[in-house]
Image: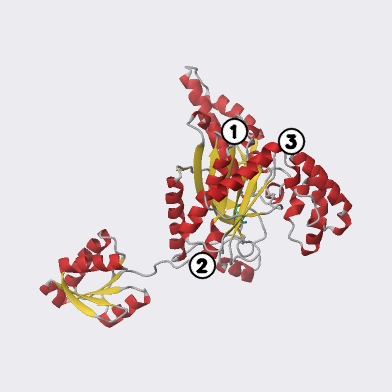
Amino acid sequence: MSDATAKKEERRKFQAIRGTRDLLPPETALWSHVEQTAHEVFATFGYGEIRLPIFEQTELFARAVGGDTDIVSKEMFSFADPFNPDDMVKTMVQQALQLGLGVELKHFEQAVQQSAEDKIQFLSLRPEATASVCRAYIEHNMQQLPQPVKLYYMGPMFRRERPQKGRYRQFYQIGAEILGGTDAPGIDSEVIEMLMTFFDKVGLQGATLYINSIGHNGPDCRRAYIGALYNALLKNKDQLGPDSQRRIDTNPLRVLDSKLESEQAIIATLPHIADHLCDGCKTHYAEVKRQLEVRGILYQENWRLVRGLDYYMRTTFEITAPGLGSQNAVCGGGRYDGLVELLGGPPTKGIGFAIGEDRLILSLQESGKGQVQQGRDIYIAWMGEKAYATAIRAAKDLRKAGFSVELPPVEQKFGKALGQADKLGAKYALILGDNEVSEAVWTLKTLSTGEQAKFPEPDLLEFLRKQKNVS
Ligand code: HAM
């Protein structure tokens, strides 16, 4: 490496990896508000929070989401992870000691190391969390709890997608799952009701709920439909793009997801799944719709809503919101009876959803609902050693009372301090100079109006409290 290159390399600025972002204040206040609202709304529906690992065995996602899906075949961040030989030795030595066996540590280590070196496990950063929730349900024997078990989660997910507005490689989801018990349509419609209640509470405007039923994987239901769809697609193969042509064989349902303008006319002629549902699935879907109506929830049916993950059956739904361009789905979900069983657990009903938090925030911001309180409540402008001691005490008391307070660490002339208070968007400046301290009467300046008033110390707190309740 030349000197110049080495120097350049030294000065290199690190940047967040493409598709990942730093979330900064004041925007993070909006994120917290959205998350807090989710905690509150979901609790009123009886859900408890589950916190899951960020990475799991690759196989878990491959089996749950499906090996042929885009998520598993192209988008997962995966890595090989050798078992840690040190830990294995420790565990085995401990076990041997517990059993009262004498151990020659050196021999033991050699043997274990050899076997451990041969073993590698494959892990992936989670691209979604439904698979993990089902894994946890099985691992913790949750089928023995009163059913259904209602869980929600929030946190980052990872998919190696092409980044664009509303699409990131690290993005955040807020999701909920109901596992166990019945598959009564009342469950499907209540999950959707909870979702719409949450969106309403955070102030999302113009959200549209789309629903569909993709039936169950039986020969008298979805499989028959896929056969019909396959035949129809084959007839039109030449007019489809390469992606859709490939999907005819790998997953014909996904052709319905295509956004390619040139394919829309052909897709419009394809058979609809509603005409192929078995009686059980037809009745279930009709009842989900009826119960949404009972709950006063508006929806639109979309026969092309098949979703991009393999585990779904019967009810599927998606919610779109304005201001997001082409990535306008803020939430996706559906029923997945059978997934727990597929992962080695007992036959279990399941349904859930995940909200794309990044997109929800974007939509709130675009509609002007993203304003969060900025700036401090009070900036303390102090001058003099004595005043500083009083200012420290005042800051402590005001913070205890819930106000956000900026206390400059070095003395400033009052003019400069007030300018700084303005820049920080403070509502008030509390002015503490020698006079204020000796008279125990403090000066409060309302920065928006320039008004100034004097208060004895206890009255000041009372005044500020009252103002806070009014605003
Ligand atoms: P999904 O449709 O893959 O479903 O993702 C749910 C939501 O996450 C999407 O509607 C979107 O808002 C957001 N999202 C997905 N990928 C990205 C990305 N690259 N950047 C930003 N946002 C994104 C699931 O993940 C299922 N686990 C949902 C579910 C839960 N079904 C049943 N239970």
Is residue 402 something that shows in the picture? yes
> What's the distance in space between the residues labelled 1 and 2, CA to CA?
39 Å
Of the image marks 1 and 3, the number of the one nearer the N terminus:
3
Q: Answer yes or no: do the residues labelled 2 and 3 have beta carbons within 8 Å?
A: no
Of the image marks 1 and 2, the number of the one nearer the N terminus:
1
Q: Which residue is mark 1?
A: 348
Q: Nearer the viewer, residue 255 or 414?
A: 255
Is residue 128 something that shows in the picture? no
Depicted 108 relative to depicted 42: above or below: above
Q: Nearer the viewer, residue 98 or 257?
A: 257
Are there few (<14), some (14-19), or many (20+) residues within 10 Å of tag 3?
few
Are there few (<14), some (14-19), or many (20+) residues within 10 Å of tag 1?
many
Question: For the residue marked with disc 3, what is the amino acid?
Answer: Gly
Residue 55 occupies quadrant = top right
Residue 279 placement, left or right of 288:
right
User: Where is residue 154 drawn, in percent x and y?
Assistant: 50, 50
Q: Secondary structure at mark 2?
A: helix
Instruction: Residue at 18% x, 68% y: name it.
Output: 390
Question: For the residue marked with disc 2, what is the amino acid?
Answer: Gln
Instruction: Residue at 34% x, 77% y: name it.
Output: 422
Q: Which residue is mark 3?
A: 218
Q: Which residue is mark 2?
A: 365
User: Where is residue 330 drawn, in percent x and y?
Assistant: 58, 57
Instruction: Residue at 59% x, 37% y: name it.
Output: 183
Q: Quadrant of the C terminus?
A: bottom left
Depicted 334 relative to depicted 440: above or below: above
